[in-house]
Amino acid sequence: MNLTDKSFRNSNARECHLSLQVECDGLSYCIVDMMRNQLVALRKYSFPECDRTDELVSRVAGAFSDNETLDLPFRSTYVIYLTQHSTLVPDAYFDAAHAGRYLLHNHPALYDHAPHFNHIAPLKTWNLFSIPSSLESVITSQFSNAVLVHQATPFLTLMFQNRHAARQPLVAAGLNQGFFDVAVYHQDKLQLYNSFQYGNEKDLLYFVLFVTRSLKLEPESVSLRLSGELSTKLIYYETLKSRFGDTGYLKAPAGLSLAPALQSFTPHKYLNLISLHCCVSSEENTEEEKSL
């Protein structure tokens, strides 16, 4: 996919925000005109699935060098690293000095990763995650002002923003390649966030039902809202809707519009990416985080 509206010019890059998403099978980015809060460009580079970090780093570096647009002086730059390795810590228990220790307690194999964290303000929760040090180096070499983000940060923020548009309880599922994120918002709080690997629609249905039943929620009593690159896969939607009658899609933040050249684009497919500038504070990279 490669869409750019004619309203975007290199000369107005300083008025635009750049969001990127890095995952095992590709690199996506979008550009938002901040003066109009309008999505003006979207592009995806598809990689053959990378089994090793060095392969991913090489392909990301190649995409950076291949695209002159990514050399422009954007107003701000946020980068999502798509990974299952994350930990949520409520505000009351969070201590930045111990962020890396919290993460290693749940994911001990991440010794060669750099720890980071984002604040999910509406949920009063910190999202701790890590990124391979070699990949972080490539990203920060390209974008000196980059704010690194885990996909659960926009995902959970968007779920919170969608809570009044669906009946309670609200179940959100972000369908990524190879794994999906799932969260439940009920009784005015986040009840659950997790991620599961899946290979087909039966796996997907099993885990969503497992989550709801673990919380003693019946499928007919919840609103299920989907997002993510595979949310447009018809068999996934139909399988879930067969058990969850109130099934639909998470919506983008109010006020975000699509430029004419992007009118055919399906927003919920890349919802985390295109909403990122609305879901993350530019103050995410604190001195405490940089010192970890």
Image: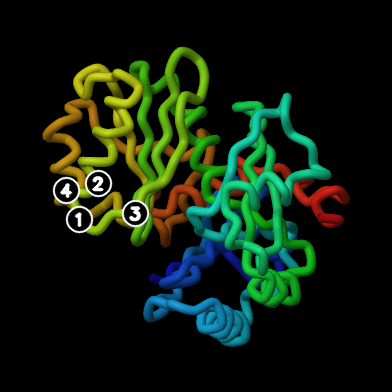
Question: Relative to 226, is 112 above or below?
Answer: below
Instruction: Please name whichever residue, 119 or 18, is drawn nearer the observer in this view of the structure.
Output: 119
Marks 4/2: CA distance?
5 Å
Determine the secondary structure under disc 3.
strand
Q: Which residue is mark 3?
A: 197
Q: Callout 4: 10 Å neighbours few (<14), some, many (20+)? A: few
Q: Secondary structure at mark 2?
A: helix
Give the percent coordinates (x, y) of residue 23: 48, 66
Marks 1 & 3, CB-CB < 8 Å contact: no
In 3D space, how far apart are the residues under numbered discs 1 and 3 (Cα atoms)? 10 Å
Identify the residue position indicated by label 4 in the image. 202
Q: Dot 1 lies on which element?
A: loop
Left/right of residue 158 with respect to residue 142 in the rendered view: left
Query: In the image, what residue type sits under mark 4?
Result: Lys
The disc label shown at residue 204, or none: 2
Q: Are marks 4 and 2 in contact (CB under 8 Å)?
A: yes
> How would you rate the neighbour count of disc 3 (Cα within 10 Å): few for under 14, some for 14-19, many for 20 or more?
some
- Is any part of residue 227 visible from this angle? yes
Q: Tell me the residue that label 1 is attached to.
A: 200
Q: Could you tell me the amino acid type at mark 3?
A: Gln
Residue at left offset 74%, top offset 46%: 99
Query: In which quadrant of the rendered image does the C terminus lie?
Result: bottom right
Q: Are marks 3 and 2 in contact (CB under 8 Å)?
A: no
Q: How is the image coloured?
A: rainbow
Q: CA distance from mark 3 to mark 2?
A: 9 Å
- Three-letter amino acid code of the residue under disc 2: Leu
Mark found first going from the N terminus, 3 or 4: 3
Q: Where on the picture, by quarter, is residue 162? A: top left
Mark 2–mark 1 contact, CB under 8 Å? yes
| Mark 4 touches mark 1? (CB < 8 Å) | yes
Residue at the image position 57 percent from the left and 53 percent from the top: 107
Looking at the picture, how far across and down is residue 230, in whole percent?
A: 30, 55
